[in-house]
Amino acid sequence: MVQPILELRGVNKSFGVVHVLHDVDFQVYPGEVTALVGDNGAGKSTLVKSIAGIHPIDSGSYLFEGRQVTVHGPNDVAALGIEVVYQDLALCDNLDIVQNMFLGREIIKRGVLDEARMETMARQALTSLSVRTVKSVRQTVSSLSGGQRQTVAIAKSVLWNSKVVLLDEPTAALGVAQTRQVIDLVRRLADQGLGVVLISHNLADVFEVADRICALYLGRVAAEVKTSEVTHSQVVELITAGRSGSLGLAPAEAAQSM
Ligand SMILES: Nc1ncnc2c1ncn2[C@@H]1O[C@H](COP(=O)(O)OP(=O)(O)O)[C@@H](O)[C@H]1O
Ligand SMILES: [Mg+2]
């Protein structure tokens, strides 16, 4: 058995009186893509933001490389080697690709920015992911397509030697060809040994690229399954009803979840 690189055990999270995450167990394995699926409001983004250190968890454990850790904020999470790519990306339109990739983490040599080194590293990160559609790393982000922006945001995680990358709906705003590129990129990240978490509404993408699927239903993990062991319609049922045949929450549990 391979040890999860990242693991949550029994995590609960409430916002005021709204109990969003219920006893969530979640594992991410190195070299694998874990898809996190669930209906709108199931708690996917809350789970990602809890992992990212944006929302403190109320109870439960957070383990990284098998050790329990306490995260106080996004900086602690980045220091562990966990990178999060949010849906709204947070790239700066007026800056070029190199500047975006090194924003806040610029390389300085003898008091000045080491532009040549940063440019080389940015290019290497893109090349290592077989990104060929970006013509120059000195293009401003405003000149890039949606898919290229997503690519730049994802390549940052390679640049910073991350061990885990979480992608919240990376293909939501993309067309067919761009989605294809991003899904290929997700696979290559995992092939480089990273633990990848993909949140997606598109089950075709999930079935194509994910090794495992974790289905959230009203803030509970309905099931955590290997992709090869479930059908499309079982996953749809897990998402919409919290259960599917012998899989998922017990009927009473599915009904009481709120
Ligand atoms: N900051 C917040 N304050 C209060 N409620 C929140 C907050 N963030 C999320 N929620 C609630 O948590 C639930 C899960 O939301 P979310 O994690 O965004 O779901 P998903 O990403 O699966 O669509 C929703 O009911 C949402 O209204
Ligand atoms: Mg969300």
Image: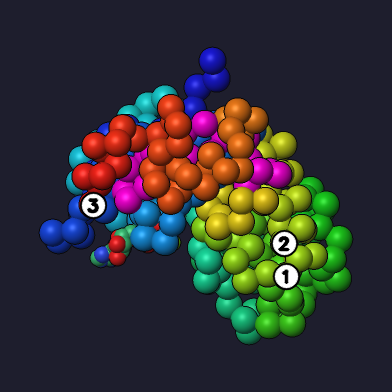
Q: Residue furthest top?
A: 1
* Side (left or right) of 3 relative to 57: right
Q: Which residues are the magenta region?
A: 206-225
On the question of residue 78 being in view, the answer is no
Q: Secondary structure at mark 1?
A: loop
- Find disc 2 in the rendering and name its residue: 179
Mark 1 neighbour class, 10 Å CA radius: few under 14, some 14 to 19, many 20 or more: few
Q: Secondary structure at mark 3?
A: loop
Q: Which image quadrant is residue 1 in?
A: top right
Q: Amino acid at mark 1?
A: Gly
> Viewer-proximal residue, 76 or 57?
57
| In magenta segment, residue 176 | no
Q: CA distance from mark 3 to mark 1?
A: 34 Å
* Side (left or right) of 112 relative to 5: right
On the question of residue 246 being in view, the answer is yes
In terms of sequence position, does the residue under pointer 3 or pointer 1 come before the other?
A: 1
Label annotation for residue 130:
none
Vertical placement of 38 versus 15: above or below? above
Q: Position of residue 226 (x, y in %)?
A: 57, 30
- Find disc 3 in the rendering and name its residue: 258
